[in-house]
Image (cartoon, rainbow, N blue to C red):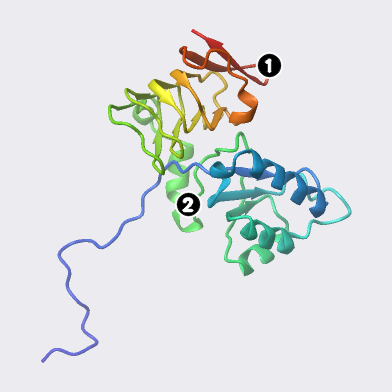
């Protein structure tokens, strides 16, 4: 006779843990003045509301622990939620800040080098062995570049991520987002958001046949549509980084 204490038998695995590259903006704070932070953050959100809406966010406190006055992390987290930004972790926090983060069910991390708003993947402590494997990849993995080719249109709401170069043979709709660790080539219109060099590569570029983008970014340096000032938008363009500034040039 079977009992309730008997473990069920499954022929298929129900789940697995995998390491992955996960892109999320990093909020790198330079002051403990919450009023100042709120004001500038609202300005940023106003410039690109679709980019920030319901976005995951990593809070970096590396520049907020040298002042005599500590930032009100509890108030900051509550404010972020009201602005539809969802913190998924804090880094470089002190013991008190880590406790506050955990009260909000936000994990803390020890990342010391934030290279771009689209930073390295965030791993739970239970995946420490996977993190070590990522930090020291074997030679075969290190020499593998995962380029991606897509022939269909990228529609509103879709998010595409490539670990190498990303080539799209069609258009990118408004409200869509394409990201690549290398270059981005779009043979149609770019109306959504394109982020190249998301792991910090300043040599990455964006190429498109028609530039009508909501946002473009190279290695974390970005411009929204209002800042693009595009001459001849219907002509092919390339976007690259020069002296820490985004340059848009007709091909």
The residue most toward the top is 251
Find residue 68 and report its horizontal and vertical position in percent: 89, 53
Pointer 1: residues within 10 angstroms few (<14), some, or many (20+)? few
- The residue labelled by disc 1 is 243
Pointer 2: residues within 10 angstroms few (<14), some, or many (20+)? few
**Callout 2 touching callout 1 (CB < 8 Å):** no
Q: Nearer the viewer, mark 2 or mark 1?
A: 1
Residue 234 relative to residue 93: left or right: left
Residue 66 relative to residue 59: left or right: right
209 or 25: nearer the eye?
209
- The residue labelled by disc 2 is 128
Residue 65's disc is none
Is residue 112 among the parts visible in the rendering? no
Q: Is the residue 30 above or below the residue 251 in the image? A: below
Question: What residue is drawn where x is 37% and y is 27%?
Answer: 171
Q: Quadrant of the N terminus?
A: bottom left
Distance from Cα at disc 2 to Cα at disc 1? 37 Å
Residue 62 figure quarter? top right
Which SS class for mark 1? loop
The residue most toward the left is 1
Mark before the other along the chain sequence, 2 or 1: 2
Residue 17 figure quarter? bottom left
Find residue 207 and report its horizontal and vertical position in percent: 46, 17
Find residue 107 and report its horizontal and vertical position in percent: 57, 59
């Amino acid at each position: 006779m079977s009992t309730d204490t008997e473990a069920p038998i499954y022929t298929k695995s129900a789940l697995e843990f995998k390491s992955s590259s996960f892109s999320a903006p990093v909020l790198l704070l330079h002051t403990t003045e919450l009023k100042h932070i709120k004001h500038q953050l609202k300005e940023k959100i106003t410039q690109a509301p679709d980019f920030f809406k319901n976005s995951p966010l990593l809070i970096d406190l590396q520049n907020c622990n040298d002042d005599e006055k500590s930032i009100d992390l509890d108030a900051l987290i509550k404010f972020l939620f009201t602005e539809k930004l969802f913190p998924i972790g804090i880094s470089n926090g002190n013991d008190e800040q880590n406790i506050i983060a955990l009260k909000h069910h936000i994990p803390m991390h020890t990342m010391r080098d934030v290279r771009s708003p689209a930073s390295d993947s965030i791993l739970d402590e239970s995946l420490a062995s996977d993190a070590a494997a990522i930090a020291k990849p074997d030679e075969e993995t290190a020499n593998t570049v995962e380029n991606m080719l897509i022939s269909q249109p990228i529609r509103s709401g879709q998010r595409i991520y490539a670990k190498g170069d990303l080539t799209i043979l069609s258009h990118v709709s408004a409200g869509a987002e394409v990201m690549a660790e290398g270059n981005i080539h779009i043979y149609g219109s770019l109306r959504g958001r394109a982020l190249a060099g998301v792991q910090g590569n300043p040599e990455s570029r964006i190429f498109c046949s028609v530039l009508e983008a909501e946002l473009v970014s190279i290695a974390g340096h970005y411009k929204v549509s209002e800042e693009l000032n595009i001459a001849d938008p219907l002509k092919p363009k390339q976007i690259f980084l020069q002296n820490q500034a985004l340059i848009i040039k007709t091909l």
